[in-house]
Image (spheres, grey):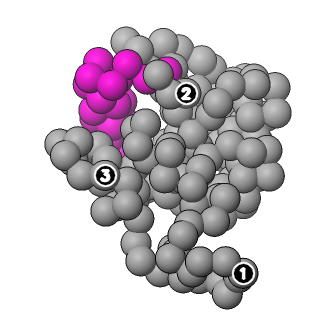
């Protein structure tokens, strides 16, 4: 079982006619995913512009849904969770600052697009098929250039768990 922490609007996107309906649809999809995979899944949505003056947490099936309080971003909530709750987190966000913070805390980080592909896939493909080739060749480094570095290995393990 993996502990997955998701930046909600980052995964969902924000260009929707009915934001509430889109949020509920995403949560339903994640509930179905949790039933199959049995992961501990937490999704964090921004409430910093129009939200409540306090953070709200609710359980919807096997998914924990957190709305940040007004004045606080989902990124700040995710960083606080990573700092305070020591679990083997897999962070889902395409936000570079969130991903870098997760890596600095030795947690795996997966982009929203990679996680979306995992949601859609039937589970027949391996993690190497999902990672793009340029992920392996971004920097010049010592050793075998065909072997993934430490960060990429952690990402591959995370994708295999998802």
Q: Position of residue 158 (x, y in %)?
A: 50, 43
Residue 38 highlighted magenta (yes or no): yes
Residue 3 is marked as: 2
Q: Secondary structure at mark 1?
A: loop
**View extreme (bottom): residue:** 140
Is the residue 49 above or below the residue 83 in the image? Answer: below
Residue that mark 1 sits on: 142
Residue 47 highlighted magenta (yes or no): no
How many angstroms separate mark 3 from mark 2 (CA)?
20 Å
Q: Tag 2 or tag 3, which sits nearer the N-term? A: 2
Q: Mark 3 packing: few (<14 Cα in 10 Å), some, or many (20+)?
A: few
Q: Position of residue 14 (x, y in %)?
A: 43, 55
Is the residue 41 above or below the residue 50 in the image? Answer: above
Classified by dominant secondary structure, the portion drawn in magenta counts as helix
How many angstroms separate mark 3 from mark 1 (CA)?
26 Å
Q: Is residue 40 left or right of 71 when viewed as pictured?
A: left
Q: Nearer the viewer, residue 41 or 76?
A: 41
Could you tell me which residue is drawn at 57 percent across and 80 percent down? Answer: 145
Q: Position of residue 146 (x, y in %)?
A: 50, 76
Kindly tell me whether residue 118 is visible in this rendering.
Answer: yes
Foreground mark, 1 or 2, reads: 1
**View extreme (front): residue:** 144
Q: Mark 1 packing: few (<14 Cα in 10 Å), some, or many (20+)?
A: few
Q: Is residue 45 left or right of 17 when viewed as pictured?
A: right
Q: Position of residue 120 (x, y in %)?
A: 22, 47
Could you tell me which residue is drawn at 82 percent across and 33 percent down? Answer: 83
């Amino acid at each position: 079982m993996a502990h997955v922490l998701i930046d909600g609007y980052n995964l969902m996107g924000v260009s929707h006619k009915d934001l509430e309906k889109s949020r509920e649809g995403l949560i339903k999809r994640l509930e179905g995913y949790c039933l199959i995979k049995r992961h501990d899944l937490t999704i964090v949505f921004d409430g910093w512009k129009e939200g409540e003056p306090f953070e709200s947490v609710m359980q919807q099936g096997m998914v924990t849904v957190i709305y940040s309080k007004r004045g606080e971003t989902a990124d700040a909530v995710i960083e606080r969770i990573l700092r305070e709750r020591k679990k083997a987190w897999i962070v889902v966000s395409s936000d570079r600052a969130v991903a870098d913070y997760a890596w600095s805390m030795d947690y795996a980080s997966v982009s929203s697009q990679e996680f979306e592909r995992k949601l859609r896939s039937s589970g027949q493909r391996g993690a190497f098929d999902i990672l793009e080739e340029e992920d392996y060749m971004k920097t010049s480094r010592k050793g075998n250039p065909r072997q993934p570095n430490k960060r990429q290995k952690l990402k591959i393990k995370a994708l295999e768990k998802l």
